[in-house]
Each structure stands twice: as C-alpha cells, then as structure tokens.
Amino acid sequence: MHPSASPTPDGIDAYPDDFWPDVEDLVTEDDTPVDSIFSEKQQRLLTEPLYAGARERPFAAMANVGLFYRTHHPPLVPDMLLSLGVEIPQDVWTKSHRAYFVWEYGKPPEIVVEVVSNREGHELDSKLADYAAIGVKYYAVFDPERLLGDRLLRLQELHGASYVERATLWMPDIGLGLCLWDGPFEDMPARWLRWCDAAGTPIPTGAERAEQERQRAEQEHERAEQERQRAEQEHERAEQERQRAEQEHERAERARERAERLSERLRALGIDPNGAAD
C-alpha cells in the first residue's frame, strides 16, 4: 500500500492518513550510546538553551533522535535537529511519537546539526545529499577536532535540490544564528557550537540565565544599598544643617538678649543706646 519512498515535503498534506506507514515495527531507538562525553554535552548545549528561554512560537529541538523521512529506509540520526511551528506530543510513548517522523510532524526540520567525531560519519557526502533530499533548509557541520579538514564549522543552505554554503552564520528566517564559543560548559572548558542572536551573543543556558538573574538581583541590591546610604547621608547632612541653623538662631537670640540688656543698662545711666545723651 505504501511506496518505498516518501513524497516531497511540499506534498505531505495532500496524502490521506492511510497513505502513511504503520510504524509499529520500526526500530526507533537501538540503545546505541553517544560516542563521547563532549558530543553528549554539545548536543544538550544545542537543545537546552532553546527550551530555557521564552518561547515566541512552538518548536521541537531534539538531540540524537531518529529522523524518519521515507518508508522501508533507516532513519538519519542527526546530533541535533530543530523544527519550528511544531509541538512534541504529550504522549511520547506512542510508537509514532518516539522519533521525528516527517509525515507525523508534517514537515522536515528547518535545520540539522552534525558534530563530527570520526572520519566515517559521511557528514560532507551522503548525509549532505540525504538532508537535501528531505528538504532540510539548513545543514550545519561542526568539526571540533578538524577531522574533515581545517574548517571548524560549515553552514549550508538548501537552494533547489542542493546545498550552498552560507557566507554568514545568521539565519534571519528562523531568527537564530550559530557561533563558536570558548568557555566552560558544565565545568568542561572547550570550544563549543552555540546558538546566538543577530549580534552574535550566545543564547544563554538555563544556568547562565539563572546566574545573570542572580547578578542582576545582586546589582539591584547594591544599587538599593547605595541609594539607602545616599539617602542616609542626605538625611545626616540635612540634620547637620538643621542643627547649624538652630545654633545660629540660638547665637543670634543670645546676641539680641545681650544687646537688649546693654541697652537697658545704658538707659539706666541716662545714655541713649542709640547715641543721644539725656
């Protein structure tokens, strides 16, 4: 009932539900471990920050999950994929929800990322052709050990049936860019591939967002403390001014009283305190 190859992504909605294969017998996970600690962390660094931030639109970010795109054919398993405008089903235990089936989500991902860990991954040949055939618009290859050449990062964009390397790592239509970042992630210092904004600033992880919030709260506390100290100093200055004014008033009052007593004594002696004699 089902052809050996799936239709092009643009035609997905035109096919009836019973066109699509029964996935109950498909192997959606084979328990193959990730190939290195770095790769495992890198995959999470490409998914976790997207979920840690505010979501303007639904999306699915997956790491090391099967991408099924045609029947009777093994899936591709990109290190990371991002699909916009879709939602991961709540029931992830249903067989048809355990992987990224293009016919279930109604579209291919916008971008897939491959992290090179050996020279047998075919990231620059067969996978390049496969992702183009699926209709994945962007294809990124991160080669941290430079196993495939001198390039650390390549970003390809689909034009027609083939990929063309982009001159920039910013992808305006999906509102994300890629960047290389040197620093520690979960106490592991390395050069990492990260999502970034149009200015090239990495999208923060949940831990980084929490640290930024902590620093902002600390700065706000410091500013509030400085304001409190300034207000206290202003109050002290005002109090000092009040006391000085009060002292000046008291001195003036004493001087007035002394002058009044002197005038009275002068009058008692018949002397006009204003200068005229009786």
Image: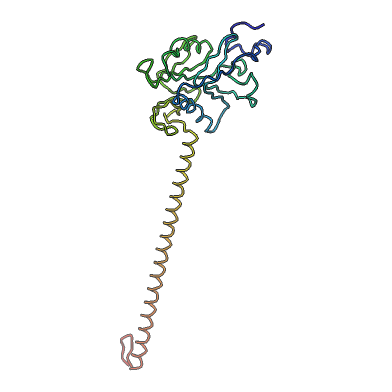
Q: Of 91 and 239, which appears nearest the observer?
A: 91
Is residue 40 toward the left or the right of residue 21 in the image? left
Q: Residue at x 52, y 33 (%)?
A: 52
Q: Of 173 and 165, which appears nearest the observer?
A: 165
**Quadrant of the image for the C terminus?**
bottom left
Is residue 85 toward the left or the right of residue 237 in the image? right
Quarter holding residue 229: bottom left
63 to 159, vertically: above or below: below
Q: Of 191 and 236, which appears nearest the observer?
A: 191
Which percent across, then down, holds residue 185?
A: 43, 32
259 to 128, vertically: above or below: below
Quarter holding residue 61: top right
Q: Residue at x 44, y 53 (%)?
A: 225
71 to 86, vertically: above or below: above
* Number of numbered discs on residues: 0
Q: Residue at x 45, y 14 (%)?
A: 121
How is the protein colored in the picture? rainbow
180 to 148, vertically: above or below: below
Quarter holding residue 10: top right
Q: Residue at x 43, y 13 (%)?
A: 120
Which percent across, then down, holds residue 199?
A: 42, 29
Which percent across, then down, holds residue 237?
A: 39, 63
Which percent across, then down, holds residue 82?
A: 53, 22
**Quadrant of the image for the N terminus?**
top right
